[in-house]
Image (spheres, rainbow, N blue to C red):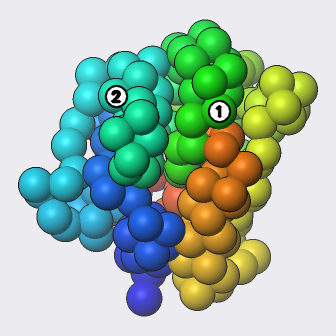
Amino acid sequence: MTHATAVAQGIWSSGADLVGYVPSVSVAPVITALGSPERVFPLSREEEAMGVLGALPLTGRFGAVVMQDNGFGNALTALTTFNAAYHLPLLIVANTRGGLGEYNSMIHTFCQHVPALLDHLGLRVFTLDRRTTPADWQAVVTEAGAHARMTFRPVVVLASFWATNPEAAA
């Protein structure tokens, strides 16, 4: 099992009814692994994803978002004034940028601060990297979804996809 497949299986195991994503080459392996085109769809911006998938609990359903961590720059207002403020559970799996092997020097400026920023805003964050197995990734994503539902809050999993798939960075 690859790390991308593990994330996809973790999302479905979390009970997600629908998954939205912001297209990116770094999250493409997860999107492919999710399959189910009737339940997985692209969104144009991260704040749109927070609103569309974050509103699902109002209908008795649960959503997940797959994105890059630099997208939190766009998503924070929606995430804090809608999802967190109204106690709407949401699973967010974000590829981390700016770590080992990052080729885009511009991305470091924002992405290095994402974990602390999310923590400062009171959002629960779990981190995955190449030091853990795909089975660990699946378990953490599944449990993060359960935690979101149990606490009625958005939960973020920051996963270093680049580090587990070096060919994607080329």
In the rendered structure, the answer to whether residue 40 lies left or right of residue 159 reads left
Does 48 sit above or below residue 126?
above
Q: Are marks 2 and 1 in contact (CB under 8 Å)?
A: no
- Relative placement, left or right, of 76 versus 48 is right
Image-quadrant location for residue 153 = top right
Residue 81 position, x and y percent, is: 63, 13
> Residue 164 vs residue 128: left or right?
left
Q: Residue at x 89, y 26 (%)?
A: 120
Q: Nearer the viewer, mark 2 or mark 1?
A: 1
* Residue carrying label 1: 87
- Pinpoint residue 72: horizontal percent, then vertical percent: 59, 25
For the residue pair 166 and 29, the one nearer the viewer reads as 29
The part of the image, by quadrant, that contains residue 35 is bottom left
Is residue 117 among what the camera can see? yes
Quadrant location of the N terminus in the rendered image: bottom left
Rendered residue at 54%/49% (across/down): 91
